[in-house]
Image (tube, rainbow, N blue to C red):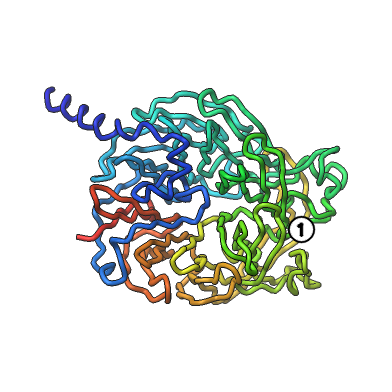
């Protein structure tokens, strides 16, 4: 009994320091390189760790320090958060675990009770992480609830119903915690939902605002829809965004229109699908938008991570937002106004002749889905997808995992049935296609490719750049790897036994740098001996 009491005391001592992550810590996370406090590490979403203990000259010695095995079947897609010696992680179907960052020992576990008729249309049962604010851990569930957990114990503080899962809504992304509020988006574009982005009071769970991604009659952008098509127009917001505290603007990607492959029932540009929206964080009011793929019929949503960067542009300092889009174009925008500054292909694409002076694509005739099937690059999954890019201020390169692959796109009948697939066609791989993957280092301001590291197959893993001059990632074949950030040369690899579909991160514990990478059904945490 005494041993059990001592163990409980020890666990509380380990976890007690983790209970407070105020907004000021989140805002100043760049100055706290030993922690990882948000999904992308910092509000600017650069996914860059300044830690430099692990370098090109010693990374070959990297070995697992500890491994956490998930309790449920399914592949991890989550990015862990680390604060004050505690690591917070979600498992595929949404359980949240708090682990001792030194050893991987479990401190507490919370598991959602999901309905037997759970609907996950167009995506697997996955969860990509949590948000921290003050003494609370926030998580979204597959049945479209937002839950606030006590950071010390995992006890539920409040739960809100964000949307109706029976209509196809779900939450798969990590929420984003701001000053007193938590912002969360929804999945379900393949079910003909009407997408939105919500903000909730962090203390009470009361909804502060909602931004509808498909405008209703009387709202700006509604004219880009025809008839009642807006009611089932899609526009999911299923990945986390970025935030500029000085401008108080949120930057969030919006997904595909519905139905996916038959645009006949929704003539027009279909705002704000396939767009980046900049919203006032206090009110949810739209400040500006930029649509990458008007009237999308290939499911090339804009649910990629926007990366914020302050840099000199044509001789003057400028606030920028960078995005490698699923449609195979790399974009540089002014993040104050949304002005298009540059756009170039970063992967093979056959659907557009290029972009005009305002960034609008110039479509190639005959590339729309058809009854017989139309071969187009990139594939349904895009030139990249939800997994995160990274930016290094040391090299000034933007690193992105690339999928070089085409698809045959089919057009079919589209009939809306609540809670069912609303696709309007289908997609198939080209027979015998030699698809491959790559990590590409791009000049952040021009999009010019500086180097490439080839992968055997199109990846599902994001990337992490570090102050030690490395880029970490993982392959479908289970290889964790580290590349030289300047050249792309492979310097280290480790076979984990499970395919990667997550994003790496790094943290400091007791003066020692760790790199955490979720793979298969396990979290590997690496360190130097």
385 or 46, nearer to the observer: 46
Vertical comparison of 301 with 221: above or below: below
The quadrant where residue 97 appears: top left
109 or 396, nearer to the observer: 396
Drawn side of residue 61 relative to residue 120, left or right: left
- Residue 510 location in percent, x, y? 23, 47
Query: Which residue position holds label 1?
Result: 294
Q: Residue at the location (60% across, 34% down)?
A: 199
Q: Quadrant of the C terminus?
A: bottom left
- Residue 245 location in percent, x, y? 56, 43
- Residue 168 location in percent, x, y? 64, 40
Res. 204 in view: yes
- Residue 456 location in percent, x, y? 45, 73
The quadrant where residue 424 appears: bottom right
Vertical comparison of 349 with 189: above or below: below
Q: Residues within 10 Å of mark 1 (few under 14, many from 20)?
A: many
Drawn side of residue 467 relative to residue 529, left or right: right
């Amino acid at each position: 009994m005494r041993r059990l009491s001592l163990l409980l005391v020890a666990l509380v001592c380990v976890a007690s320091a983790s209970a407070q992550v105020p907004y000021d810590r989140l805002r100043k996370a760049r100055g706290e390189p030993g922690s990882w406090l948000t999904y992308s590490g910092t509000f600017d979403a650069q996914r860059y760790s300044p830690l430099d203990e692990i370098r090109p000259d010693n990374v070959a010695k990297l070995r697992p320090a500890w491994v956490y095995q998930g309790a449920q079947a399914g592949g991890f897609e989550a990015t862990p958060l680390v604060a004050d010696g505690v690591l917070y992680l979600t498992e595929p179907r949404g359980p949240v675990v708090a682990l001792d960052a030194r050893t991987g020992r479990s401190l507490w576990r919370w598991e959602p009770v999901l309905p037997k008729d759970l609907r996950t249309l167009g995506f697997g049962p996955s969860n990509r992480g949590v948000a921290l604010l003050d003494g609370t851990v926030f998580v979204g569930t597959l049945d479209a609830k937002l839950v606030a957990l006590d950071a010390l114990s995992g006890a539920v503080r409040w739960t809100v119903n964000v949307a109706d899962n029976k209509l196809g809504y779900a939450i798969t992304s990590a929420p984003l915690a701001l000053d007193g509020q938590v912002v969360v988006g929804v999945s379900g574009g393949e079910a003909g939902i009407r997408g939105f982005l919500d903000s909730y009071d962090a203390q009470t769970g009361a909804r502060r605002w909602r931004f509808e991604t498909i405008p209703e009659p009387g709202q700006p952008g509604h004219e880009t829809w025809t008839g009642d098509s807006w009611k089932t127009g899609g526009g999911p917001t299923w990945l986390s965004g970025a935030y500029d505290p000085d401008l108080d603007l949120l930057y969030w990607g919006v997904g595909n229109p519905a139905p996916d492959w038959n645009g006949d029932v929704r003539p027009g540009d279909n705002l704000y699908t396939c767009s980046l929206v900049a919203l006032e964080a206090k009110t949810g009011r739209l400040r500006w938008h930029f649509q990458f793929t008007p009237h999308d019929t290939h499911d090339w949503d804009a649910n990629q991570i926007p990366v914020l960067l302050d840099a000199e542009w044509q001789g003057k300092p400028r606030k920028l937002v960078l995005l490698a889009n699923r449609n195979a174009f790399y974009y540089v925008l002014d993040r104050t106004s949304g002005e298009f500054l540059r756009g170039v292909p970063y992967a093979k694409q056959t659907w557009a002749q290029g972009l005009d002076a305002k960034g609008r694509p110039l479509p190639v005739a005959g590339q729309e889905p058809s009854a017989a099937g139309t071969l187009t690059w990139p594939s349904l999954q895009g030139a990249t997808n939800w997994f995160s890019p990274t930016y290094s201020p040391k090299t000034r390169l933007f690193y992105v995992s690339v999928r070089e692959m085409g698809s045959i796109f089919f057009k079919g009948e589209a009939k809306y049935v609540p809670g069912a697939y609303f696709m309007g066609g289908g997609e198939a791989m080209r027979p015998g296609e030699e698809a491959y993957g790559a990590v590409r280092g791009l000049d952040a301001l021009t999009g010019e490719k500086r180097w490439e590291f080839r992968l055997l197959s199109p990846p599902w893993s994001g990337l992490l750049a570090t102050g030690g001059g490395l880029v970490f990632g993982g392959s479908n074949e289970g290889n964790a790897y580290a590349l030289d950030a300047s050249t792309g040369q492979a310097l280290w690899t480790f076979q984990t036994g499970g395919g990667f579909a997550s994003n790496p991160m790094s943290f400091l514990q007791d003066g020692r740098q760790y790199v955490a990478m979720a793979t298969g059904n396990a979290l590997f945490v690496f360190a130097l001996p």
